[in-house]
Amino acid sequence: MSESTRKTGTSLLRWACVPHALVLYLSILSVLFNSCDTVDRSKFRTCDQSGFCKRQRAVKEGYSKYKVDLSNGQVSSDKVTFSVVNPDGGHKYILQIIAYDGVFRVKFNEESPLHPRYEVEHALLPDLKTTSMQVSKGSDSWTLTIGENAVAQVFGDPLRVDLFSQGKKVAVFNGRSTLKFEHLRQKPDVNEEPKEADDSENDVVESSMWEESFGGNTDSKPRGPESIAADIDFPLTQSLYGLPEHADTFMLKDTTNSDPVRLYNLDVFEYELDNVMALYGAIPYVIAHSPEATVGVLWLNAAETWVDVGVSKGGLVDSIVNLVGGSEENKEGRTRWMSESGIIDTFFFMGPKPADVIRQYGKLTGTTPLPQMWAIGSHQCRWNYNDEDDLLSVDANFDKYDIPYDSIWLDIEYTDGKKYFTWDHHKFPHPVEMINNISSKGRKLVTILDPHIKRESGYFLHEDATNQDLYVKDKNGKIYEGWCWPGSSSYLDFFDPKVRQYWASLFALDKFPSTLDTYIWNDMNEPSVFNGPEVTMPKDMMHYGNWEHRDVHNLYGLMHIMSTFEGLLQRSENRLRPFILTRSHYVGAQRYAAVWTGDNKADWGHLKISIPMCLSLSISGMSHCGADIGGFFHNPDAELMLRWYQTAAFQPFMRNHAHIETKRREPWLFGDQITSMIRSVVRKRYALLPYWYTLFYENEKTGMPPMRPLWLQYPDDVNTFPIQDQYLIGKCF
Ligand SMILES: *[C@@H]1O[C@H](CO)[C@@H](O)[C@H](O)[C@H]1NC(C)=O
């Protein structure tokens, strides 16, 4: 970025510190109604319908007896390693505490599992720098200190880790002794009499442990039960945030009388508002905030995960009253995390202030590289712009109506029969000339590229993938076939470096007819499988490295966008910044892509929820966030369209997009008055672009998101904690 741009941005920061009508728009939205329910719930599991979630949720406080051998901890400068035994049955585990700058990592795994258990790759930055700890050994506990103010106290019997920031206890790991680690085991012989349970982890014996059916699909579970869970509590506060992606409140709600919050990347048709059902992305990360201290917790696990949230004692209102009144009661927020496989690997970002937590999280998981100025402008999309003439006339109308915009998008219909990296040569006979026509005005084209590949002989990508062994397979080594947009499809295994390299090579301009002004939209990457269990890939499919889909599910989209990012870099010989929009996301996805909230709906409730959804994503790293303007499904009326533009103009990612069965909704189609009001707010957006650009620069450097909850800026003001219909753009706008 040039020096002059930077200066403009800085001066904007100064003049922008005035109250603005934005807050007013948003307050109006907050009183409007939510939509009615439309999602087909029977397609998606509840906790009760998920074997491991049901087993883990039944665990009572005081259940686990894991004992840490404090007499024999192995100390190196940045790491302490203990052996742990479960006295019920004697199974052995390893507990490790690792130090990074301002961060404790608590890892717990079997000492010698029957086969390796998956540890998440690619989410964290490579080559993380650890830091040294001071270690003080006691007989009941060890005390580990990073710097001056971050302390972890490890208790032996039962296992517990207390975390202190500036002398205050901010988090407790396994304080309620609900840690339950299902160690790997041989499948019992069905002819044998059921044995006495030989340890506490076998005390619930259920058929779902070795095979499980749901909605006509059977999960063969060849490795049996292997779930993990632990409680992590926050003694200072019930103000918990995070765990995107959900169409729910910004501040996490109590789940005692509902399902736990579910993290399992899914393509949910017509999703509902105000509930904890899974959506397209999963970031297992919580920030617990109070005026006294702020702490973040990352549960680094890519398998299906459910999180129980306990903020019930007195509830939100009471807890604020108590905070105001200085009462010590009812302050503790509780969480319990349950994952289907993998290991327990948690990170405690010790703060003490919200900005510190944000920075610490960014240092481990990366930040969003500064987007191009055009990428933070206004985007125009539709499923679909039909052909070259259609696209050019929409483009020309933006000029005619004098509404600024920076990119036009093509959804799946531009391809030849949903075969990605091809063009429909009847509708788009001159793609390169068409793109050049657009980019001669300084605009870009964004085309969609999904991870499912049409199984059609003669299609080069399918032929290559078959011949070069690039597809996900089933457990017998047969290529997996599912159903998606093109019909019968197979799925590239982006976990294989060879596949990532292959995919990246396809962006070369002599392979994909396009130009350097063509950027990419990666959709359907949960992955979406229309005929799969819960509209996704069966858990017993196999990926590179002999991992089951079960272990890596939530990472699939990240691997997809990583490959696309590499392709866009290679295409320009590392000269040009990539731009990618993704639907699926996981920890670290912010390093590669912007995100939108998926297939929302043309109603006021969906407009309103775009704010808490993007706030939640913003504090969890995914800072370049937006929602489809107008709502993807159904038709917005003129007022909704206008209000949506007025809202989206003040969100980080701004795109008008619609379903193929909706009426056209380009901004000049709602009457002159609406057109002029949309023009005016889009111009406001453009007037502020240098400010947004500067904020994104700050975001890259510090992790601080451009779209900020009020408490991020005013951490001591408890009145701001539940607010989700107002936010700040930067410090004070
Ligand atoms: C590009 O623009 C020129 C000049 O307006 C026009 O004649 C031509 O048809 C356009 N081509 C495509 C493929 O859009």
Image (cartoon, helix red, strand yellow):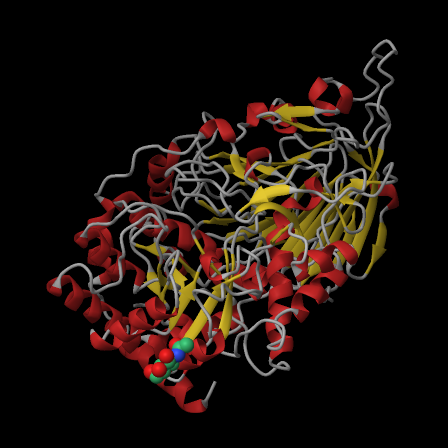
Point out the quarter of the image occupied by ligand 1: bottom left
Quarter residue 714 falls in: bottom left
Q: Nearer the viewer, residue 236 or 65?
A: 65
Q: Nearer the viewer, residue 117 or 489?
A: 489
Question: How many dots with numbers?
Answer: 0
Judged from this view, the residue extending furthest toward the front is 426
Question: Where is 424 relative to 186, above or below?
Answer: below
**200 sits to left or right of 574:** right
Judged from this view, the residue extending furthest toward the top is 193
Rendered location of residue 670, percent (x, y): 17, 59
Q: Answer whether residue 163 is visible to the viewer in this image.
A: no
Judged from this view, the residue extending furthest toward the left is 673
Give the quarter of the figure containing the C terminus.
Answer: bottom left
**Residue that appears at 24% across and 63% down:** 667
**216 sits to left or right of 700:** right
Q: Nearer the viewer, residue 325 or 181?
A: 181
Rendered location of residue 95, percent (x, y): 78, 44
Rendered location of residue 732, percent (x, y): 32, 68
Quarter residue 540 falls in: top right
**Residue that appears at 45% across and 68% down:** 428
Question: Where is 277 relative to 345, above or below?
Answer: above
Rendered location of residue 344, percent (x, y): 70, 42
Q: Answer whether residue 602 is visible to the viewer in this image.
A: yes
**Residue that appears at 34% across and 76% down:** 689
Q: Nearer the viewer, residue 289 or 420?
A: 420
